[in-house]
Image (cartoon, rainbow, N blue to C red):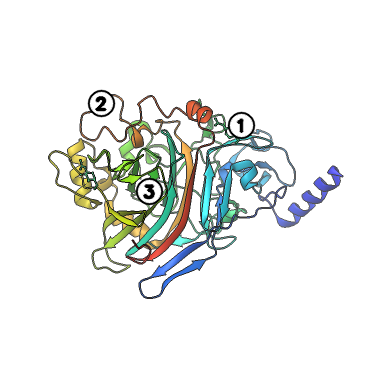
């Protein structure tokens, strides 16, 4: 019975071509969203989500032998990047059972740790899809993006993120024909940190110089990183939040190597602005605006509105300002105003805000160096993919979001304190063992004309 099944599966996958596994059928969880106009109101879109390929079971074509186990490549199936891409297939995902990803109607819940039948899964990242094979592309200039979020079950050290990255709509399939899986299997990720932990970049396995992570038994890093512009609309837990544009000097997904990746002491020598220009209300001087029982009360659900304002109020004008407001219990809450010595009060992200913030905090203005609003605006106009994720931070314990950071600076110095979490919080081994059931729920996604996606 089992051998018959395996035989028929392998025939099926040979007939279909390489790189897609068929042990589990890929079925994208439905997640309704809405498109809105000022004149016509909102209409429902039948969108869905897809799990990123990095989380998927990677095995030999037509079979079930792992190409990658834990944080190591199989040297027989994967002797080099192109042979590995030919030999290995990404399989379909059991979204709730293996990954703790569930959706109902317009709501998506991502659970932090999921003990499945074969593995323990930590965190996840999904993308919104327009069809079974294409990511939905958002052109955000002169538009507004709105969603509801429940972060009440997200403690210090976790991040429930909603953001846009400049990925290709087909996951890179047409540019790189050796990628036979494409967006349907969540390929083609890139972001402004130029991550090295991505297993396939440009249709090749990233196995050269692969170094297993010292602290993450599921991850490693390869020679190449994959960079692209990133607009972090929402990085948050119940204690702190930030929204942050990260421009790059390149357009679209770009494989990096060496200095270009901006690793370590090359942080500001790479092609992307890894720091970004962040607006975090706590860091900007209001410690009672966001949190448990605060003005924006993270004990219950609220609405987050982000507006991408252009100079001439058209979809092709120059990006001028990224504004934020919240709605909770039927009340519109304006963003907090910055309250930092030597800096005027700002309540949104603009070129002037970024310059003033970097000066006040003594930070390098890499945002400006990497093209600032011009380059970010170009990406927003071209179209970006919506990513939703839950993650813990093996590099910096999420202290840059919710605690005092960097650790060698005095927390009373402007810009160092970002949230009320302890500097000892957020260690992955602690949060994974103490808060495995943490989760974030995103719902009611709306996109459209400024002022069309929310009401009080
Ligand atoms: C923080 O924001 C709230 C709500 O806008 C406001 O009432 C309060 O005065 C602000 N606090 C500071 C220190 O700016
Ligand atoms: C997480 O949830 C499971 C299932 O409901 C429960 O058995 C377990 O005790 C919970 N773990 C923690 C640390 O709360």
Between circles 2 and 1, the one closer to the viewer is 2
Residue 227 visible, this angle: no
Q: CA distance from mark 2 to mark 3?
A: 25 Å
151 vs 90, nearest the viewer: 151
Locate ligand 1 by image quadrant. Answer: top left
Indicate the quadrant containing the N terminus: top left, top right, bottom left or bottom right: top right
What residue appears at the point 24 percent right and 35 percent down from the top-left corner? 415
Q: Is residue 264 above or below residue 28?
A: above
148 vs 416, nearest the viewer: 148
Residue, disc 1? 70
Residue, disc 2? 409
Helix, strand, or loop for circle 1?
loop
Residue, disc 3? 232
Q: CA distance from mark 2 to mark 1?
A: 36 Å
Give the image location of residue 204, x and y in percent.
57, 45
Give the image location of residue 369, x and y in percent.
26, 46
What residue appears at the point 35 percent right and 44 percent down from the top-left corner? 297
CB at disc 1 and ligand 2 closer than 8 Å: no
């Amino acid at each position: 019975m089992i051998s018959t099944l395996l035989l028929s599966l392998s025939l099926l996958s040979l007939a279909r071509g390489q790189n897609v596994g068929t042990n589990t059928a890929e079925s994208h969880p439905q997640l309704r969203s809405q498109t809105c106009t000022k004149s016509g109101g909102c209409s429902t879109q039948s969108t869905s989500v897809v799990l990123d390929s990095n989380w998927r079971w990677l095995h030999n074509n037509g079979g079930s032998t792992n190409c990658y186990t834990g944080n190591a490549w199989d040297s027989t199936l994967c002797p080099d990047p192109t042979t590995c891409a030919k030999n290995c297939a990404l399989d379909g995902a059991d979204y709730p059972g293996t990954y703790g990803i569930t959706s109902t109607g317009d709501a998506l819940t991502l659970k932090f740790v999921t003990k499945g039948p074969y593995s323990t899964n930590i965190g996840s990242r999904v993308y919104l899809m327009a069809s079974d094979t294409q990511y939905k592309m958002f052109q955000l200039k002169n538009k507004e993006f709105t969603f509801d979020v429940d972060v009440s079950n997200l403690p210090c050290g976790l991040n429930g993120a909603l953001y846009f990255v400049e990925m290709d709509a087909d996951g890179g399939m047409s540019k790189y024909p050796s990628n036979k899986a494409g967006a349907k299997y969540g390929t083609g990720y890139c972001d402004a940190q130029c991550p090295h932990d991505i297993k396939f970049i440009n249709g090749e396995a990233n196995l050269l110089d692969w170094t297993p992570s010292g602290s993450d038994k599921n991850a490693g890093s390869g020679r190449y990183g994959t960079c692209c512009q990133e607009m972090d609309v929402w990085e948050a837990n119940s204690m702190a939040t930030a929204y942050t544009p990260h421009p790059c000097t390149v357009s679209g997904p770009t494989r990096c190597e060496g200095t270009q990746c901006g690793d370590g002491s090359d942080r500001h020598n790479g092609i992307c602005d890894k720091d970004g220009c962040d607006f975090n209300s706590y860091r900007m001087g209001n410690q009672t605006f966001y949190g448990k029982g605060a003005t924006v009360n993270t004990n219950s659900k609220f609405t987050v509105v982000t507006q991408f304002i252009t100079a001439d109020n058209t979809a092709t004008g120059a990006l001028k300002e990224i504004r934020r407001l919240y709605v909770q219990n039927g009340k519109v809450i304006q963003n907090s105003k910055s309250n930092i010595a030597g800096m005027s009060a700002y309540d949104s992200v603009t070129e002037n805000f970024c310059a003033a913030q970097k000066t006040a905090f003594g930070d390098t203005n890499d945002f400006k160096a990497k093209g600032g609003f011009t380059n970010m605006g170009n990406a927003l106009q071209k179209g970006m993919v919506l990513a939703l994720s839950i993650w813990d931070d093996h590099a910096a314990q999420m202290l840059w979001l919710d605690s005092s950071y960097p650790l060698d600076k005095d927390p009373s110095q402007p810009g160092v304190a970002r949230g009320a979490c302890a500097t000892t919080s957020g260690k992955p081994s602690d949060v994974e063992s103490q808060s495995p059931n943490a989760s974030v729920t995103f719902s009611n996604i709306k996109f459209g004309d400024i002022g069309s996606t929310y009401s009080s």
